[in-house]
Amino acid sequence: MSDIAAKLAALGLDLPKPAAPVAAYVPVVEQGGLLHISGQLPFRDGQVVTGRLGADMDEATGYDAARRCALMLVAQVGQAVGGDWSRVEKIVKLGVFVNSDPGFTAQPKVANGASELMESLFGEAGRHARSAVGVSVLPLGAAVEVDAIVAVKPA
């Protein structure tokens, strides 16, 4: 897993600074060999990507928002493991919440933005279980929010 930086560069991506919590929680809890990562929002140029899929945002833009959430998840993982990517064993599960108009039903396709980035970065270890859920509103008006469970080796 130590070539994450090279894989990010090959994809033209920079790892952002991990986002600070916006309420009374911590971004990551490590317990029993698992990182439980709080929901991460999509950021573009330092601003939360807002919108509602099927109303004022299309599927492709939602896919990109989910990918941006996953990038922030990776930043949180990197901070939690102190930059030691060899500790990451498996992306176990992603929970993807999509701010959706009532008629929008392509949440799984939007969620692929996060899932495909995890597989691109972590290979087979990035293949995971997933939920993709449409919701009526997300914090700060975000278009997508993604949380995760990641298996790690002891420090």
Image: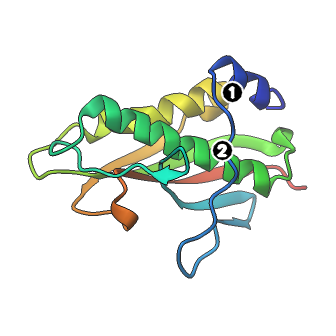
Locate residue 155: give its quadrant: bottom right
- Mark yes or no: residue 97 visible: no
Q: Looking at numbered disc 2 in the image, what kind of residue is underneath it? A: Val
- Above or below, 88 against 95 in this view is above
74 versus 82 height, above or below: above
Describe the element under mark 1 as helix, strand or loop.
Answer: helix
Question: Does 32 sit above or below residue 105?
Answer: below
120 vs 20, nearest the viewer: 20
Q: Considering the image in quadrants, where does the N terminus appear?
A: top right
Q: In the rendering, at what x and y percent does residue 72 appear?
A: 60, 48
**Residues at circles 1 and 2 in contact by the CB criterion of under 8 Å:** yes
The structure residue drawn at horizontal position 68% and vertical position 58%, both measured from the top left corner, is: 35
Q: Is residue 127 visible?
A: yes
Q: Element type at marker 2? A: helix
> Residues under labels 1 and 2: Cα distance?
10 Å
Residue 141's x, y, as percent? 33, 61
Of the pair 35 and 12, the residue shown nearer to us: 12
Kindly identify the amino acid type of the residue bearing the numbered disc 1.
Leu
* Residue 8: numbered disc: 1
| Residue carrying label 2 | 74
